[in-house]
Amino acid sequence: MNHTTKKKWRTSFLAWGLILPSFVFLVLFTLYPIAKSFYLSFFKDNLSVSVPSFIGIQNYLDLLQDSVFKQAFMNNLIVAICTIPISIALAVAMAIFANKVKFGKGLTRVAFFHPTILPMVAVADIWLFIYTPMYGLVGNFFPNLRLLGSADTAIWALIVMLIWKQAGYVMIFYISGLQGISRELYEAAKLDGAGPVQSFMHITWPLLKPTTIYVTVITLTNAYKIVDHLYIMTKGGPGNATNMLLFYIYQVGFDFWDVGKAAAMTVVLIVMLLVVTTIQFFVQDKRTFYS
């Protein structure tokens, strides 16, 4: 074995050695649970049986008849449709403002990012107080308004909280994207008579497309992993008006102890997110310019 071959083997072993810890965690806490959920989804495993029994795809067929699952699915869809574009729009606006402000740039960024570093339980408690009738911030101005107590308004109150929580986090990625855009492009556009709106539409936004693809995936997964907020604020109520897929999986698996059905819902959620993410990458990536 010559020196070049030995060096190549050492480099390969070093690379695999550095990857191995992360790979072990990936297998133990991501791949194995997914495979286990897929396996359990074909079994009847609840309090009515002492030993899990194989029932094929019956758990998946039962989901089609589950009205709570359908409502949780629609609620999650509404949350995703509302929070993703609004969070991205706010993040872009905040990033542009934080990038251009002349005084207190660091303080501005910290102020926008601050909600992100708060624990999810703390955020839920803060907004629960804000929405409290008579005593909260909203309740002081509208004493009889019960946002979380009405099926018509509860989900919209949660959407406002979720946007407030994640917009600052998304902003960080857009600030990084803005700093990668050459100032010469804006100077050339200004010489050609382009205004701020034209510069944004034809320079800033197209060049931020790679960032947008990435943060869309992040905000999509955030929209479908809501548990802490619901547990503290609404418990999925009133009347399942705010129930979400992941929280319903938690209820079915740990409150009702129907492991097979919870596993089936988990598989549906994972497959749905994988499909949407794959489409997002392969379709949008072709229309994206990478500098």
Image: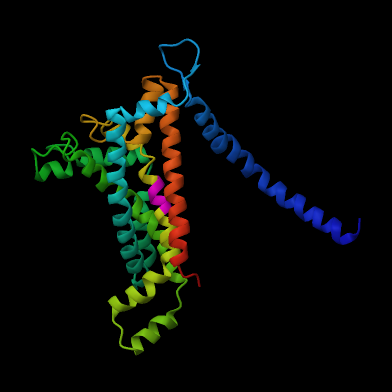
Q: Residue at x 81, y 53 (%)?
A: 9
Q: In the rendered image of this protein, does residue 135 appear above or below residue 172?
A: above
The quadrant of the picture occupied by the N terminus is bottom right
User: 174 and 33: which one is in front?
Assistant: 33
User: 201 and 138: which one is in front?
Assistant: 201
Q: Residue at x 30, y 44 (%)?
A: 77
In this image, 49 relative to 158: left or right?
A: right
Per the image, is 186 magenta? no
| Residue 26 placement (x, y as % from top left) | 58, 40
Q: In the rendered image of this protein, does residue 25 appear above or below residue 42?
A: below
User: 206 and 157: which one is in front?
Assistant: 206
Q: Quadrant of residue 260?
A: top left
Q: Residue at x 42, y 65 (%)?
A: 209
| Residue 16 placement (x, y as % from top left) | 71, 48
Q: Residue at x 37, y 61 (%)?
A: 109
User: 238 and 170: which one is in front?
Assistant: 238
